[in-house]
Image (cartoon, rainbow, N blue to C red):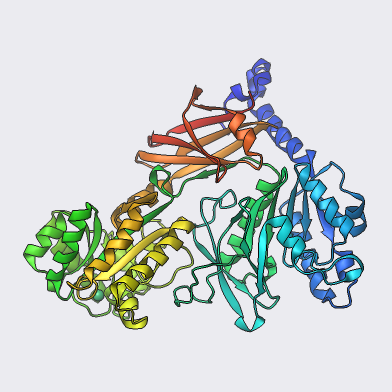
Amino acid sequence: MKTTEIHILPVIKRIPSKLNYLLLILLIAAAINLSAQEKKIALLYPKNTLALPTENTNWLNDNFYRWELFLIQNKYNYEVIDDDDLETGLPSKYALLILPAVRNLNDEEISSIKEFMNDGNSVLSTWSMGVYGSEGKWKGWSELEQLFGLSFISEISQTEASRIHSIFGGTPLSSNIPPGFRLQVTTYDKPVEVKIISENTYPLGYWLNNEIPFEGKELLERTTSAVYGNYGKGNFVWFGFEFSAVVAAKEHQKTANTLLNNVISWLTDNLITQIETWPGGSKSAAVLSCDVEFKFDFINNALDLLEEEELPAQFYVLTESIDLPSFERIKKNGDVGLHGDDHVLFKWQDYATQYNRLSDGIGIIEKLMKKKPISFRPPETYYDDVTINVMEDLNVNVLSSDFIEDRAVPQFINERNQIIIMPKTGFDDYDIFQRLKIVNIQDQSQRYILDFMRTYEEGGVYSLNFHTQMQCRNNFINALRKPIEEIKSRNVWITTHDKVFDWWRKKDKIKLNSIRTDDKNYIIEIENKGEEEVDDLVISFYKKDFDDLLKAQILLEGRNVDYFSDVNSKKLKISIPKIYSREIKRISIGSQ
Ligand SMILES: [Zn+2]
């Protein structure tokens, strides 16, 4: 708190200095409470839905109380209303209406919801909202479709057991959620999948159409059950599933909880502040990554292409196969990591064996490079806890594995945040040749592009992993041309795994602290808690009423600052070209 400068509340200046600190805290606390208390959340108890003979009343009641518990646990200021209240129209004390699995909505209620949104208020709704109308008659999907700009596709069958729904980074609802998180949703209550048909509605992610990512079931036209957007002057969020359907695993529960809090924060018009995932605010990252192993000299085909395209790559070298002239060329085209001393699995070997093998391999590369490699892609990508201990002891920082992770961005995997695991975000050439049996290079290109595009939209890192003895062959290397063109044509940071680690480690030390000083004024502190300076940081801002942001006075360290406003995604971005170790920078956003 000591960094909360006095000038944000001029009235404090006149208070004797001893009292400053305590009073300041109290006043800020009061200011925050006041603004939060101004407007309330209305939670609808679905009385009319429960009265329908077709409905599972136990489930609906449980579901309602789960929502209420969520609001209580997160200390929201809410009131329970019922269908009769909604029918007569919502008073202006409410800013947000929550409709949990409200399947029965009569015409008066629908008009009331529209009026509420037209007045600039928000709606959060789930599942098959309003499929029954007056007197409990089946009405179908038209209300849902019309209010939220959707087209109904299907109710997902219970027999599927569960499916993966990705969650994007770079949206107003993405704070503190790893981009491309693969939320696993059980299908016992038949989630509703839709397509978006309005330009005022945006996906928060997509269904991956299977339980495990990368089964190859992905469709070109994707469906979603998580959308946000605006209707009239109001904003809405709709989920086609209930949050009780998210699997019980800790990370999934945590993500679902964070997501719901983000949703409420945005819908109640808080300022949303995020650090952009990638340097310079790039939408995603991409790494061309090659296992340089058997047929070592085939790497020259890839190097011809990389040099022509002027692109770096990540090379994972099998030291027993090194061909020196080829290695000399590799050195000039990116970063070199280790794929192993030989191709025998590390997994299941004892500590001493794994330690000696990793340290031998690193030693060989270090000698040739005059620089210690920091990245490791174990043979067959298999590893175990011993491998991670050995990496920690030898200061190797990047584990590139094909074990499917729950997100599209790297993740720290040891306590000291010194090792990251790179996620698998697409098929590699082994999958393409051996599993999917795609041998035509046009089709191979398309497959790579499909995975890249998904990761791009998610805001994650796409690693195009290939091997010397497969994709690098004369007849197949050109399958990489079109994916490279596609990657280059977009706002993508094309880099190496080594550099992704460097960025991830530095970004991890950046902390944001947003202080709301009154209804319309905010101070955002950006602190670099690390030992090194960080370049190319971009901070983004969202607000339900984007016009408020466009009209606001925005100052960085008290001076006017250039910012970039993206009207389509309703995002405002501010570049911080450099922030030194232990430095705090302040952005103030306020009404003029
Ligand atoms: Zn290999």
Quarter of the rendering occupied by the N terminus: top right
Residue displayed at 30% across by 59% down? 484
Label count reads: 0
Instruction: Please identify the residue farthest to the bottom as the structure is shown.
Output: 159
- 582, above or below 306, in the image: above
| Residue 423 shows in the view | no
Please name whichever residue, 188 or 18, is drawn nearer the observer in this view of the structure: 188
Quarter of the rendering occupied by the C terminus: top right
Please give left or right for residue 13 compared with residue 98 in the image. Answer: left
Please name whichever residue, 130 or 522, is drawn nearer the observer in this view of the structure: 130
Residue displayed at 88% across by 54% down? 86
Q: Quadrant of residue 350?
A: bottom left
Please name whichever residue, 482 or 487, is drawn nearer the observer in this view of the structure: 482
Residue 273, horizontal then vertical, whole percent? 56, 42
Q: Quadrant of residue 52?
A: bottom right
* Quadrant hosting ligand 1: bottom left
Please give left or right for residue 166 compared with residue 364 in the image. Answer: right
Please give left or right for residue 145 compared with residue 274 in the image. Answer: right
Please give left or right for residue 395 compared with residue 167 in the image. Answer: left
- 392, above or below 25, in the image: below
Residue 351, horizontal then vertical, whole percent? 29, 74
Residue displayed at 55% across by 44% down? 568
- 7, above or below 262, in the image: above
Residue 168, horizontal then vertical, whole percent? 53, 57
Residue 94, horizontal then vertical, whole percent? 81, 45
Instruction: Please identify the residue farthest to the left as the structure is shown.
Output: 325
Please name whichever residue, 164 or 178, is drawn nearer the observer in this view of the structure: 164
| Residue 62 shows in the view | yes
- 2, above or below 119, in the image: above
